[in-house]
Image (cartoon, rainbow, N blue to C red):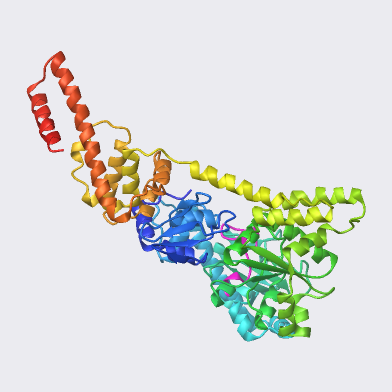
Amino acid sequence: MPGKIPKDFITELLFRTNIVELINRRLILKKCGQNYKANCPFHDDNTPSFTVNKEKQFYYCFGCNAHGNAIDFLIQYEHLSFIESIEELALMHGMNIPFEQTTQHNLYFKKQTLYLLMQKMCKLYQENINFTNSAKKYLSDRGINKKMVDFFLIGVSSFNWNEFCTKLKINKIFEQELLTHNIIAINAKGYKYDRLQGRIVFPIQDHHGRIVGFGGRTLNNILPKYLNSPETYIFYKRKQIYGLYQVKQKCSKPLYLLVVEGFIDVITLTQYNINYVVSSLGTATTSEHIQLLFQNTNLVIYCYDGDEAGKNAAWQTLKKALPYISETKTLKFILLPNNEDPDTIIRKEGREKFQKRINNAITMSKFFFKNILKNVNLSSNDDKFYLSARALPLINTISSDTIRIYLRQILARMIGILDDDQFEKFLYEKEIKKKYRSHFQIKYTPMRILISLLVQNPSLSKAAPEIVKFQKFKLKGLPIFLEILQTCLDYPNINTGQLLELYRNTKIINILKILSKWDHMIVKKEIQNMFLDLLTNIYNKILEARQEYLIAQERIKGLTINEKKEIWSINKALSKK
């Protein structure tokens, strides 16, 4: 396990991160007063309820209650772990993570070593093309030009590892590192070999451009035809999309992503200026792939061969994607003629005709019912029952209320059920949900308002009086307030996002998160006055409680000299109210 990350480093990381810029790279934010708004990425959101505050470095959704700082957003949106989100931000700012009590066995350092080794191997594969005529011929025969070879960092691995080492002057230390990290292997006879030997090599890059793995295409018909490098700490096939880095180099927010099956398909279409082309490494589409694609665009178009295998693959993809479809995120499908793939057909038809195929792609709803109606006779009641039993469970996986109801209505008409009240019921149901949310409120108390004002506006700590005089008194919520106040004083320029990060995994983080997004309904220009008034009122209540205690003690057994001085000072303070 990695050592602990110093809190000061995390605070500095958040200080350097502009949460508006971070989120705007992933969502389309629109300025709205002092905040930025968007449709929430975490729930089915018809109207923008996702708010980002630059001053507080904090986001909050009024619909689903999602909230947090830049680290929380990466955890929720990109499904990263806490450590991975820190790594992501550190990489953005060119900072190394100063783990406490680190050892070279830490996962973080293993990953950094792997990134370095993969980068070196990529350069070696690229250089090796100059020594390999069969690779040059293969690329030339496929019509792949030098620009694409360089853009996609295409290389080649030799059939013989020792020959590869000799040509490219690989030393024994580097070779041992490759063995240690399972990039190359030793067979039963003791010979070292590259797992991608004798193959054209396609480097696979993450969204930062780092090499995380390789795909290989055989040059001499050795099976399998295509092969990916083994999974490692940095390479998971179910989460990786080939070509996405190249797409994002051209356009940070692509209009759509066209998903094809092979490396060559991606490269050839890109060469023909069919932009936004990616591939899922020749593996079956996973839910992680779909989520990653939707994080980068609102429209994903899958292109499959038109044979039965292609149609079945498209149907399986649609079923996996249904839970992630919404009013703003949708799929389309292209089914090519039999025995054609994107690489071959664009060479026959040209760019314009292929672009027409993209423009005329089958919509999600049409493709859904086209497949669900296979072998169904709508004149048969039994077939109608079968259709309903088959379609409804799939439709019900869709999170979007609107799309789910729409598909149910189409299904109802197909099987002869005309329920005109369904939409009215839907609207009523949504209204009930809204009312329920609006009635869910926290009870207002002076201490809760005080803490919420401070959490949402940490700079108020500079206006607070000396806190020493508060510390000896007992009042519900006071210890939390004093601790937060002291933290704000210790970090004079801290914002809400940084403040919450300092209390991650503590006992009070949940109450702080609730209060950080609590609407206290106080206009901005009155916030400081309200804060100071509440502080004064709470202090006076503490004094009154202490005054009553001392008066009672005086009646029972009398007061000491110090207690008499204390009650005198309390009386004096309260007389100024």
Q: Is residue 232 magenta?
A: yes
Q: Is residue 183 visible?
A: no
Q: Is residue 221 magenta?
A: no
Count of marks overlaid on the render:
0
Residue at 12% from the left image edge and 38% from the top image edge: 576
The answer to which of 362 and 484 lies nearer the viewer is 362
Q: Quadrant of residue 219?
A: bottom right
Please determine whether, in this image, residue 307 is positioned above or below residue 462.
below
Q: Which residues are magenta?
A: 228-246
The answer to which of 21 and 575 lies nearer the viewer is 575
Residue 70 in picture, x, y percent from top left: 44, 57
Please determine whether, in this image, residue 565 is positioned above or below residue 328.
above
The answer to which of 480 and 527 lies nearer the viewer is 527
**Most frequent secondary structure within the magenta stretch:** loop
Residue 350 in picture, x, y percent from top left: 74, 85
Residue at 34% from the left image edge and 43% from the top image edge: 449
Image quarter where the C terminus lies is: top left
Q: Is residue 61 visible?
A: yes
Residue 180 in picture, x, y percent from top left: 57, 59
Residue 572 in picture, x, y percent from top left: 10, 33
Residue reaching furthest to the top: 556
Left or right: where does residue 483 sit relative to residue 100? left
Please determine whether, in this image, residue 484 is positioned above or below residue 76.
above
Residue at 19% from the left image edge and 39% from the top image edge: 468
The answer to which of 51 and 112 lies nearer the viewer is 51
